[in-house]
Image (tube, rainbow, N blue to C red):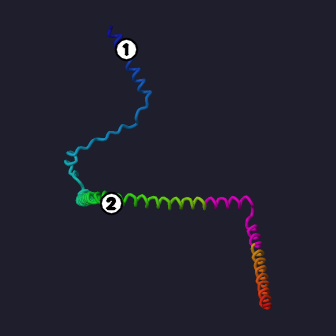
Amino acid sequence: MPFFLHSNFLFFFSHSLKAKMADRPQPHQLQVHPQRRYEDVGAKGRGGPSASTILAVVTLVPLGGSLLGLAGLTLAATLFGLAVSTPVFIIFSPILVPAILTIGLAVLAFLTSGAFGLTALSSLTWAFNYLRRATGFMPDQIDQAKRRMQDMAGYVGQKTKDLGQEIQSRTQEQGRRT
């Protein structure tokens, strides 16, 4: 291939590549963050932990160690208690298992009873509110029912009084005849 054709091809290829790169958006700024090495920091005199870091480590390491020790003691006490109580549970299991079942069923029955009671109460409340809305204005009807009850109580009271007087008069007549 002649040199002349080869150089034109390279010129054309580089020119078309530059045109394609120009179509792409170029970044406005290029940020480079240099990596800091521990040796570089120490060389400047600013290396090493700060006083607050040292104070935090000095304070928290013994505290963490003592809490870890307490956790270990708690684990050991739990394992010891489990080792001692397991044979006791096995020996008394014929008594404990029915007792636990009885207590559990009693608690379950009590909670079920309470749930049924709350359900009934909420159902009755809903029905009362539904009827009150369906029948209209209830206070007038309640006042009318109260008046009827008072009238009936007055009537029953009067009848009782009349009956008492009649019984008394008959008793007196019977007393006079004898």
What residue is drawn where x is 42% and y is 27%?
A: 22
Q: Position of residue 146 (x, y in %)?
A: 74, 72
Image quadrant where one finds the C terminus: bottom right
Q: Amino acid at mark 1?
A: Phe
- Disc 2 residue crowd, few under 14, some 14–19, many 20+, Cα 10 Å: few
Residue 9, label in figure: 1
Picture quarter containing residue 98? bottom left
Camera-nearest residue between 118 and 73: 118
Q: Which residue is mark 2?
A: 92
Q: Nearer the viewer, mark 1 or mark 2?
A: 2
Tell me which corner region of the image, top left, top right, bottom left or bottom right, holds residue 161. Answer: bottom right
State whether residue 52 appears in this view.
no
Q: Secondary structure at mark 2?
A: loop
Asked if residue 92 is positioned above or below residue 26 in the image, the reply reads: below
* Image side of residue 125 versus residue 58, left or right: right
Tell me where the magenta segment starts and ends, as one range: 122-148
Q: Quadrant of residue 71?
A: bottom left
Of the numbered discs in the image, which one, if any, rests on residue 58?
Answer: none
Q: Residue at x 33, y 8 (%)?
A: 2
User: Magenta: predominant secondary structure element?
Assistant: helix
Residue in the picture at 34% in, 12% down: 6
> Would residue 104 appear left or right of 55 to someone viewing this image?
right
Precedes in sequence: disc 1 or disc 2: 1
Q: Amino acid at mark 2?
A: Phe
Most foreground residue, 106 or 160: 160
